[in-house]
Amino acid sequence: MTALDLASPADVLPLAGYTVAVTAARRAEELGALLDRRGARVVRAPAIRIVPLSDDTELVAATRAVLAAPVDLVVATTGVGFRGWLEAADAWDLPLVAHLQSARVLARGPKARGAIRGAGLVDAWSPASESSVEVLDHLLSGAQGPLAGRRVVVQLHGDPLPDFVAALRGAGAEVITVPVYRWVLPEDTAPLRRLVGSVASGGVDAVTFTSAPAAASLLQIAAEEGHAAGVLAALSGPVRTFCVGPVTAAPLQSAGITTLQPDRARLGALAREVVARLPERDPVLAVGGHRLQVRGHAAVLDGRLVEMAPGPMAVLRALARRPGAVVSRPDLLTGLSGGGDAHAVEMAVTRLRAALGAPVVETVVKRGYRLAV
């Protein structure tokens, strides 16, 4: 039996009982709504802040560098970034579109291609994979002519693409990088710092990332808060890590964290990946003639969502880790926040049984408790 089998009743949404964190700055509300509609408890903790284009002196300087001489090749990595750059240049009365008319413009994906065409420019080529790696291989192959001595403009979108730029320069190209939408830490880092603590303590079930800078920021704050080891352990174990694509996942994978990614780097696909993969974390147990799945802050019993207080939930989670094995009262006590004594465990078990309404938790005299598998 699978998690999908258990979640099939219409009244139990696939992410009910799970807490999912959203670290995005752009389109955070959209992603949060997609997860919320599927039953998740959504925690919003922006990990980055976008520097407004109108205030970005670095972008102005890069644009003037582009205008200083004719351009041979342009690489547009994102639609919103390329379009935003052209609009900002127009607001500054800089003739960027006219200047790029003679260049061959390459698009990393369909959104970038749409932005190129929308500006009245011609897209020369784009890869089927929507991958920067394939764009680089295409350029290095000589498909667009020799690179030596040619001016190549690379529109960035948060990620500096150091390997991409270094390879072009190594082939003899003069590369001008255009840092559209630079990302820095949020002005208020309190939500992100709280999220770091929750990740380290297992207070969330999954974290979603839509940009590499957001992933890097979370790891940076984890180190500052003294939670680096705990966050790495959590994201490598019980807390699922979802990234919109391989570029976003790079900082996490460099830290040894395994990530889950959709086939297509799209927000809707990311939400569907969370729906499909997060419930797989928690096995469906056959317990006393019932079907039980222990999720993050709730359980699903015979297709019925059962929400309960943290104490009973902690006891159930401890019992579910070793189905059928006896767990002693002292061991159960360690999982109860605030500590207490054997009476606290007995009260938590009583409330757990009342919430479940089914005889799935057995007392083993003088030893402890177990699930009735």
Image (tube, rainbow, N blue to C red):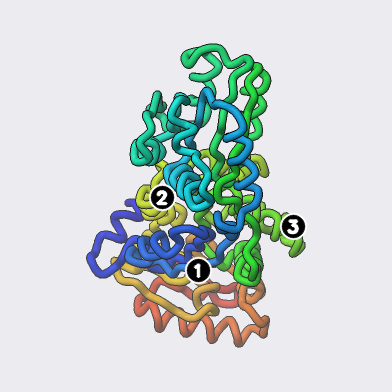
The answer to whether mark 2 and mark 1 are in CB contact below 8 A is no
Residue under the point 48% across and 25% down: 134
Residue 99: % across, % down: 49, 33
Front-most of 358 and 184?
A: 184
Badge 3 local density, few (<14 within 10 Å), some, or many (20+)? some
Residue at mark 1:
43
For marks 2 and 3, give the CA distance.
27 Å
Q: Is residue 253 left or right of residue 359?
A: right
Nearer the observer, 163 or 190: 163
Mark with earlier residue (2, 3): 3
The residue to which callout 2 is attached is: 270
What kind of residue is marked 1?
Answer: Val
Is mark 1 in CB contact (under 8 Å) with mark 3? Answer: no
- Say the numbered circle drawn on residue 234: none
Q: Residue 164: percent from the left, percent from the top? A: 60, 29
Amino acid at dot 2: Leu
The residue at the point 38 percent across, 33 percent down is 121
SS of the residue at dot 1?
Answer: strand
**Residue 301 occupies which quadrant of the picture?**
bottom left
Residue 37 visible, this orientation: yes
Note whether residue 294 is visible.
no
Q: Position of residue 297 (x, y in %)?
A: 47, 71
Q: Give the labeled residue for mark 3.
A: 223
> In the rendered structure, which disc, 1 or 3, sits on the residue that comes first in sequence?
1
Mark 3 secondary-structure assignment: helix
Marks 2/1: CA distance?
16 Å
Mark before the other along the chain sequence, 2 or 1: 1
